[in-house]
Image: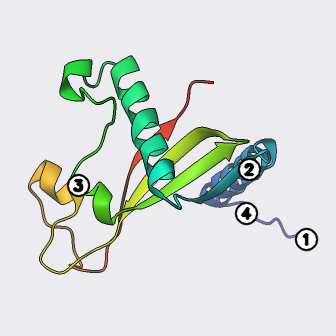
Amino acid sequence: MESVLYNDPAEDVLTLVDNLSRGFVESVTEIHFDTAQNDSDRESVYRLRYQVVVERGWATTNEFPDGLEQDHFDTNAIHIVGWDGKVLAATSRLVLPRAGQVLPTEEAFSIQIEPRGRVTDMGRQIVARD
């Protein structure tokens, strides 16, 4: 009698997602990912975030009269940047846990995320239209 291997649907989905992810990463090889290295990089991050949130209608120009979308979490955040040459194409923000401070998600939703002090908040994922 021939043995038949059962394919777990979850494994099939994971394989599909893995292959899609691999294809996506290979398709954006011209994008160079790094962390914001200086004030100029961070200003580019805040300007791109502003452009996208205003364009999408998530905020108005009056809310950010200086053309920079930023908040009090940005000072200590790690800003991940994706450069297409010298043009900022994508960005994301990591806020690491700090004693006595809440994370952005905790503040926005009035919740406490467990385990305290062991969770990093990733937010502000932005991709430029171009």
Mark found first going from the N terminus, 1 or 2? 1
Inspect the image, locate mark 3, and give the three-letter code of the amino acid beneath it. Answer: Thr
Residue position marked by numbered label 4 in the rendering:
6
Residue position marked by numbered label 1 in the rendering:
1
Inspect the image, locate mark 1, and give the three-letter code of the amino acid beneath it. Answer: Met
Residue position marked by numbered label 3 in the rendering:
105
Instruction: Report the residue at 18% width, 81% height from top.
Output: 99
19 or 119, nearer to the observer: 119
Q: CA distance from mark 3 to mark 4?
A: 41 Å
Residue position marked by numbered label 2 in the rendering:
25
Inspect the image, locate mark 2, and give the three-letter code of the amino acid beneath it. Answer: Val
Asked whether the viewer can see residue 25, the reply is yes
Mark found first going from the N terminus, 2 or 4? 4
Quadrant where the image shows the C terminus: top right
Which residue in the rendered view is the most extreme toward the left?
110
Q: Quadrant of residue 120?
A: bottom left
Q: Is residue 4 above or below residue 86?
A: below
Secondary structure under the numbered disc 3 in the rendered image: helix
Inspect the image, locate mark 4, and give the three-letter code of the amino acid beneath it. Answer: Tyr
Q: CA distance from mark 1 to mark 2?
A: 43 Å
30 with respect to 70 (left or right): right
The answer to the question of whether label 4 and label 1 lie on touching residues, with beta carbons closer than 8 A, is: no
Q: CA distance from mark 2 to mark 4?
A: 30 Å
Secondary structure under the numbered disc 1 in the rendered image: loop
Q: Residue 84's mark?
A: none
Asked whether the viewer can see residue 56, the reply is no
Question: In front of the other: label 1 or label 2?
Answer: 2
Secondary structure under the numbered disc 2 in the rendered image: helix
Mark found first going from the N terminus, 4 or 1? 1
